[in-house]
Amino acid sequence: MSEHRHHSSSEPILHAQALEHDYGSISVLENVTLPISRGAVTGLIGPNGSGKTTLLRVLAGLLEPTAGTVTYNGEETARRIGYLPQQPAFRPGFTVAETLSFYAALVGEDKSTAMDRLEQVGLSDARRRPVEALSGGMTRLVGIAQATIGDPPVIVLDEPASGLDPGMSSHVFDVATELAGAGTAVILSSHDLELVDQHADEVVVLDDGSIATRGRPAAIRQSLGVDTVRGVYEASISGETTTVRVQGVSS
Ligand SMILES: Nc1ncnc2c1ncn2[C@@H]1O[C@H](COP(=O)(O)OP(=O)(O)OP(=O)(O)O)[C@@H](O)[C@H]1O
């Protein structure tokens, strides 16, 4: 748990205010207000279907909220926000190196940046492999490398550790911590509560489209009288843990 990363500006780099999101008649986000700090890892946790992907897409500017606003207060860069989708996919017919070089060129970086990012995610040896010949975990690692190209001040990662082996899962969280150490605001979702406990500076528990609990891990553990982020999760979410709550469907 790192309490040591404080950067000059205390103003949140991204500020979501009173977000609502509906898919047709189905309300998925309700009154979500969330300031995102620079130089910190924000861990978004919550049950399946609680709205994490929806919230991350709204934060990344890929989905227009039904109501509310997201304000960006960072530097004007070639790319403000890097994003790893939950199901990364790349255009077939190109190698890993070609794919990342293409993204690097889009933001005015050269090929060496792409190769540095590949090395950072531990994928250098796969650089000549066609993207369609990668495993699910390797594809996600390419997606993480892609999200960091151009040094966007905000990086949004939707389940970056999903499908990765234990060593690579912790490595991905270490990379997130490193990026935050360099001043980047990293927001990630995960179902690995232990890794979130170890790496997140700020934890957000989403339950049924609303923020149930939010704060520094130590503070929220203390206020809920539990020892772990898993305890925080269990104390924060309502309803059964073995049934997916499907918005718009009353049981
Ligand atoms: N395009 C869509 N149209 C209609 N409903 C949607 C759409 N996308 C998501 N939903 C619904 O919104 C709710 C929240 O989905 P979301 O993917 O944001 O949850 P999540 O917390 O990321 O879930 P998981 O942990 O399973 O990935 C779910 O009930 C889902 O069925």
Image (cartoon, helix red, strand yellow):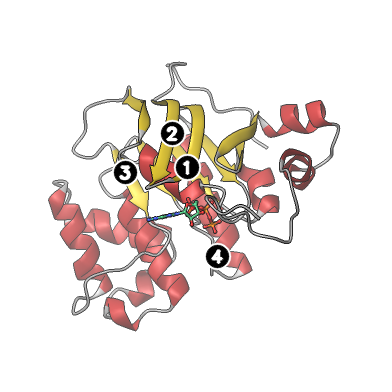
Q: Quick check: is the Cβ at mark 1 less than 8 Å away from ligand 1? A: no
Q: Which residue is mark 4?
A: 168
**Looking at the picture, how far across and down is residue 8, in whole percent?**
44, 17
Estimate the spatial distance between the alpha carbons at disc 4 and disc 1, rounded to whole Å.
35 Å
**Looking at the picture, how far across and down is residue 211, in whole percent?**
59, 34
Task: Determine if residue 202 is in view.
Answer: no
Q: Which residue is mark 2?
A: 20
Does dot 3 land on a helix, a strand or a loop? loop
What residue is at 55 percent from the left and 58 percent from the top? 171
Estimate the spatial distance between the alpha carbons at disc 3 and disc 2, rounded to whole Å.
11 Å
First in residue order: circle 1 vs circle 3:
1
Q: Furthest-front residue in view?
A: 250
Q: Which residue is mark 1?
A: 27
First in residue order: circle 2 vs circle 1:
2
Q: Quadrant of residue 213?
A: top right
Q: Please state if 160 lies on the left or on the right of 75 as rendered.
A: right
Q: Please state if 207 lies on the left or on the right of 95 as rendered.
A: right
Q: Give the amino acid type for the residue marked by disc 4 in the picture.
A: Met
Which class describes the residues within 10 Å of circle 3: few (<14), some (14-19), or many (20+)? few
What residue is at 27 percent from the left and 69 percent from the top? 90
Does dot 2 land on a helix, a strand or a loop? strand
Q: Which residue is mark 3?
A: 63
Disc 2 + disc 1, Cβ < 8 Å? yes
First in residue order: circle 3 vs circle 2:
2
Front-lying residue, 177 or 94 = 94
Which class describes the residues within 10 Å of circle 2: few (<14), some (14-19), or many (20+)? many
Front: mark 4 or 1:
1
